Amino acid sequence: MTVARAEIAAGTRWHRLELILILGVLTAFGAVATDMYLPAMPAIARSYHVASEVVAHTMASYFLGFAIGQAFFGPIADRFGRKPPLYVGIAVFIIACGACALSNSVESLVVARFVQALAACCGGVIARAAVRDLFTVAEMPRVFAAMMLVLGVAPLFAPFVGGYLLIWFDWRAIFWTQGTFGALVLAAVVFRLKESHGGAQRPLHPFVIVRDYYIILRDRRFIGFVLAAAFSNAGMFAYITASPHVLIDLFHVPAQDFGWFFGINGAGLIFAAQLPARLMGRIDGARLMLALQLAQMIAGLLLLAAALLGGGLWSVMPFLFAFVALNGAVMPTASALAMRHFPLNAGMASALMGTLYFVAGVIVAGVLGELPARNAVPMAAVIAVCGVTAIACRLLLRPLQPQ
């Protein structure tokens, strides 16, 4: 048992809860920077006199930055420890929030969102690695589920905050609020989070980093779970990217009420995220993940059918709810199954996991940005394809030997 893990075992229940809360908030950086911004997307399109599909590129650039940044922060966190990269990443995030608020064109907003994401991704990468540092393999599913509970608060409250900031001020206030959030999290990291990994004498030569990533990528115990989860999560990105236009512009939901719909789906995600903690140990984790993704695929296909039949808001929302909620159970299950085999280079494994998740998100957001959005069919079709592809990856990339 490492010194840091021994301190967790000997610590009070409050200390453990505080640690999980901080790690969960770090994981929520990406969600806060997207969910709070969603109600403003139609307003931003009107502000810059561009089509809604053009504003969707600001989301695609964010996902791209998140994907690239994680590949950078993983090796850095394994080499220098967990806290120094957090200091740099959160500080840059705060600056980038200001750049978003001050942007004077949609092109400059695209660039600022890219930089914002490059920095924001440090939270999730290092939080997942810290879980591998501090907790046993048996404890990891429960800890990841608890972190998803914290993460799930973002879709409950962030759209409400964004919607009302839009009414009281304008869309730029949303980014100033995100910067304030970043400053508060930075203070918590400085004063309340202890270092869980002192760093290691791992070379940062590009060829060594690429080689190590390649070794992890070839491991079916890792890639089989992560790639399947990446496509499940890509369906979530499709929902995040397209739902403001679908709900506000097509289904005429007021911007200040958008948070109610987004929050209900977030509540489903929170409750479903607790399933792995309760079921793993009694049910084989790989079988549990397969069952969850089968149910998610069915929800996606039913969503597509409802959209093709011209269904309105109340025909589409139940299937969106089911798909999003099941994603809350898929992600902690995949994280626990994939990360358990990489105690020595947890930062790189966490980074590669996050990068693959967001590469899928970039593809989805880019596709939606090119599709005409005259109805809910493009969003539903992309979500359904993601569900089917996730199942295909899970079946085709199963480990060759029993776990």
Image: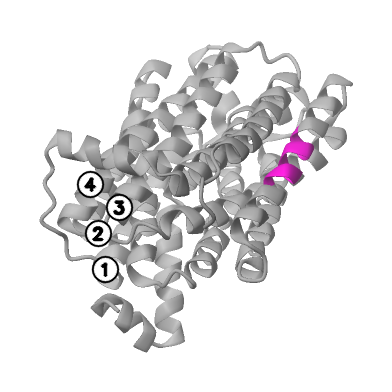
Q: Amino acid at mark 2?
A: Arg
Residue under pointer 4: 75
- Determine contact: label 1, label 2, CB under 8 Å: yes
Q: Label 3, label 4: how many angstroms apart (C-alpha)?
A: 6 Å
Q: Main structural element of the magenta stretch: helix, strand or loop?
A: helix
The part of the image, by quadrant, that contains residue 187 is bottom left
Q: Residue at x 50, y 30 (%)?
A: 360
Q: Nearer the viewer, residue 38 or 28?
A: 28
The part of the image, by quadrant, that contains residue 66 is top left
Q: Is disc 2 surrounded by few (<14), some (14 to 19) or many (20+) residues within 10 Å? A: many
Q: From this viewpoint, which residue is outermost toward the front?
A: 401
Q: Label 2, label 4: how many angstroms apart (C-alpha)?
A: 10 Å
Rendering coords of residue 169 (x, y %)? 51, 38
Q: Look at the image and say whether residue 289 sits in the magenta stretch.
A: no
Q: Residue at x 56, y 27 (%)?
A: 41
- Determine contact: label 2, label 3, CB under 8 Å: yes
Residue under pointer 1: 196
- Determine contact: label 2, label 4, CB under 8 Å: no
Q: Amino acid at mark 4?
A: Pro
> Who comes first in sequence, dot 2 or dot 3?
2
Q: Label 2, label 3: how many angstroms apart (C-alpha)?
A: 9 Å
SS type, badge 1: loop
Q: Which residues are magenta?
A: 293-300
Rendering coords of residue 153 (x, y %)? 57, 57
Horizontal placement of 228 versus 262: left or right? Answer: left
SS type, badge 2: loop
